[in-house]
Amino acid sequence: MAAAAMVVTAAGGGDFSDLREIKKQLLNVAERSRERGLQHSGKWAAELAFALEPLPLNELPPPPELTEEDARDLDAYTLAKSYFDLKEYDRAAYFLQGCKSQKAYFLYMYSRYLSGEKKKDDETVDSLGPLEKGQVKNEALRELRVELSKKHKAQELDGFGLYLYGVVLRKLDLVKEAIDVFVEAAHVLPLHWGAWLELCNLITDKEMLKFLSLPDTWMKEFFLAHIYTELQLIEEALQKYQSLIDAGFSKSTYIISQIAVAYHNIRDIDKALSIFNELRKQDPYRIENMDTFSNLLYVRSMKPELSYLAHNLCEIDKYRVETCCVIGNYYSLRSQHEKAALYFQRALKLNPRYLGAWTLMGHEYMEMKNTSAAIQAYRHAIEVNKRDYRAWYGLGQTYEILKMPFYCLYYYRRAHQLRPNDSRMLVALGECYEKLNQLVEAKKCYWRAYAVGDVEKMALVKLAKLHEQLNESEQAAQCYIKYIQDIYSCGEVVEHLEVSTAFRYLAQYYFKCKLWDEASACAQKCCAFNDTREEGKALLRQILQLRNQGETSSTDVAAPFFLPASLSANNTPTRRVSPLNLSSVTP
């Protein structure tokens, strides 16, 4: 049967005007996916269909029509499908040999593919150690490629067959060919989510996305929202998801979970937590994305909530990768790092290609000071997904511990490319440049980290210390002033160790400038901190002594008002800073 005969059209160009027709298409493709053993694609379509209004009886889609070939292969297909569902893949493939119908042929090839994957995983699973990439292979891939390639040239593959051909090519690292085949599969069968998802995993940047010739269908909107999330283009992703909600998918748990993941990616923790809590109310037995939810609870140190989530998921299904990751996070929060690593290993035995578990296991090995195991775990994470900035950042941290700054620089740069507006990557890069004595580059990184919104409030301090080293006292003072203003404007309880350092430097700076009032005010603030109390008191005594001797405050030297123009890298506008008003600052 020619591919052209198997085209299933979807409403064009993001047109959501006929939601009933979209629901029919979703129900149809969900059934066809299940018939071929594509459980995840079937589930995705079914979940999306469930979010739309029910159809009346007379509008329900009819079952797929049977061809002569389907009727001839029906007995073999029915038997093989029962074996396939029980994961007896070789047995299923044996009884499907010689079948001609599209459905039976797909199941035959897919059974052979999954049999090879299962054997590969069984070999991999016993050793999570230093496995070289490609050392354990799916032996069936080359044969499958040859057979599917012949069918492809003869235009005998339907949308599902093209999808499987693309998966085989991807597994053989033939990325360019795989992309072309997945695009073709999306044109032939635009409703099959699996092909779109595979395409997502192969696109590395927005430029690559522009050159793809994608079908003009409403499914493209879901694909773009997903790929924007993956490429960390969160604003665009959230706009897409909002437009999908407005189009009529407001009840879709898939969209709600994706929005929560997007907020997690931009570290809007409160918003992400509230959406996940809402999602749990709507779908209390859901396990997907719960490992992301547990990451948020971990970051906020919410032990009771994380404990409840771990127990709850254990009751639902203790042998799911997400459950193991949640329990691992729980033990990590309790500083039981060996136990945490054990659960991440369990997750990887269940699914060796589960990205989150590799990254989290790397973090645990870092906590246990096992740098070689951490490096292996992070490298595995990058093999699974080169876009995982956490793994690149983790490798940078590991090599930092090993005092190998050139390696650090490479990995931090890769992390920064993936997260250009994440201040943590920029601060890490700045520290690397500092160690390599490339101080101009270090200054640029720290200033850029401050300009994009410094999460950890450390960029200005590091910049100030750099100016101190270079005897640029005015710039150092300016950075410390801005740092103190930022810390106190947050309204946080100040536990920042560097606040005392900033006050001490400013007190000494104003003292040298003979600005007694400012020096005195800063010295008094020093007295509020244990580590600078004695120096503050000593400075106050000196100021008092000089005033008693008749020394007047200098009017020639003014406190600095501007950040130096040399630091405004990348045309970042220099911010005007008012002199430090200490009367409003109370520790």
Image (spheres, helix red, strand yellow):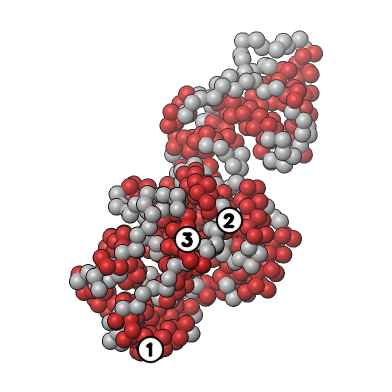
Which is more N-terminal, label 1 or label 3?
3
Q: Is residue 79 above or below residue 158?
A: below
Across and down, in percent, residue 120 comes to: 41, 79
Across and down, in percent, residue 325 comes to: 59, 66
Q: Which residue is drawn at 29% across and 82% down?
A: 69
Residue type beneath disc 2: Lys
Q: Is residue 130 above or below residue 574?
A: below
Q: Nearer the observer, disc 3 or disc 2?
A: 3
Q: Using the numbered discs, state the Cα–Cα distance from disc 2 to disc 1 in whole angstroms.
A: 40 Å
Q: Which residue is drawn at 37% across and 49% down?
A: 13
Mark 2 — residue? 251
Direction from residue 120 to residue 580 in the image, left or right: right
Q: Nearer the observer, disc 3 or disc 1?
A: 3
Residue type beneath disc 1: Asp
Which residue is more in the foreground, 409 or 384?
A: 384
Label 3 close to label 2 by CB (< 8 Å): no
Which residue is more in the foreground, 572 or 478?
A: 572
Q: Quadrant of residue 566?
A: top left
Across and down, in percent, residue 495 comes to: 72, 42
Q: Using the numbered discs, state the Cα–Cα distance from disc 3 to disc 1 in whole angstroms.
A: 31 Å
Q: How crowded is mark 2: few (under 14 residues within 10 Å), some or many (20 or more)?
A: some
Q: Which residue is drawn at 54% across and 28% down?
A: 471
- Secondary structure at numbered mark 3: helix
Extreme residue toward the left, this view = 154
Q: Residues within 10 Å of mark 1 (few under 14, many from 20)?
A: few
Residue 299 in view here: no
Residue type beneath disc 3: Lys
Mark 1 — residue? 75
Which is more N-terminal, label 2 or label 3?
3
Mark 3 — residue? 23
Q: Is residue 386 above or below residue 340?
A: above
